[in-house]
Image (cartoon, rainbow, N blue to C red):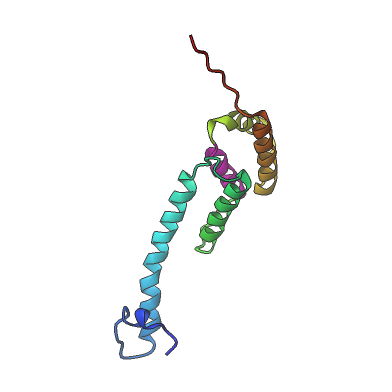
Amino acid sequence: MRIANNIKSAIPQTESIGEYPKYVEKHFHSADKSLVGTLIAELMTMKFNGSRSIQNHIIEMTNIAARLQTFRMKVDDSFLVQFILNSLPPEYGPFQINYNTIKDKWNVSEFSSMLTQEESRLKKQGSHSINLIW
């Protein structure tokens, strides 16, 4: 009585109440696998394009990692830092080199803080161009 009609119509009639939850679990388990694959692909291919702040970009990637954890797919902090690092555009190259040369590994919070500082530095620096006309 508590299941929405559109969901009820997708689940076949069963002889016993015990079969009903089994069918629902089996049906949604395959959907979970598909969602996990989609989330992993999204995390691996996500790119920072500057349309929002680096902080929001990191939060979105962290949220994807948290969603994966609900499916028992733990994304370690060091992996997440690498995914974020790989999502950065070329202007963050010096930051990437600096991170790769230090001995310490940062957790996501420390990495986010440093990356936010780098974003501010890049914004202050700006891009300068000169057009020369002959």
Asked if residue 90 is among those painted magenta in the image, a careful observer would answer no
Q: Write the residue at 38% across / 79% down.
A: 22
22 over 50 or under it: above or below: below
Q: Write the residue at 56% across / 18% down.
A: 130
- Does any portion of residue 105 appear in the rendered image? no
Q: How many numbered marks are there?
A: 0
Q: Write the residue at 48% across / 45% down.
A: 46
Q: Tell which of 125 and 94 is nearer to you.
A: 125
58 over 8 or under it: above or below: above
Say whether residue 22 is left or right of residue 132. Answer: left
106 over 33 or under it: above or below: above
Q: Residue farthest to the front? A: 134
Asked if residue 81 is among those painted magenta in the image, a careful observer would answer yes
* Viewport quadrant of the N terminus: bottom left
Q: Tell which of 42 and 21 is nearer to you.
A: 42
Say whether residue 34 is left or right of residue 109. Answer: left
Q: Tell which of 90 and 125 is nearer to you.
A: 125
Say whether residue 40 is left or right of residue 119. Answer: left
Residue 62 placement (x, y as % from top left)? 58, 53
Residue 84 placement (x, y as % from top left)? 56, 43
Figure quadrant of residue 32? bottom left
Residue stretch in magenta: 77-88
**What predominant SS class does the magenta segment belong to?**
helix
- Does any portion of residue 70 appear in the rendered image? yes
Q: Write the residue at 31% across / 81% down.
A: 9
Figure quadrant of residue 63? bottom right
Residue 133 placement (x, y as % from top left)? 50, 12
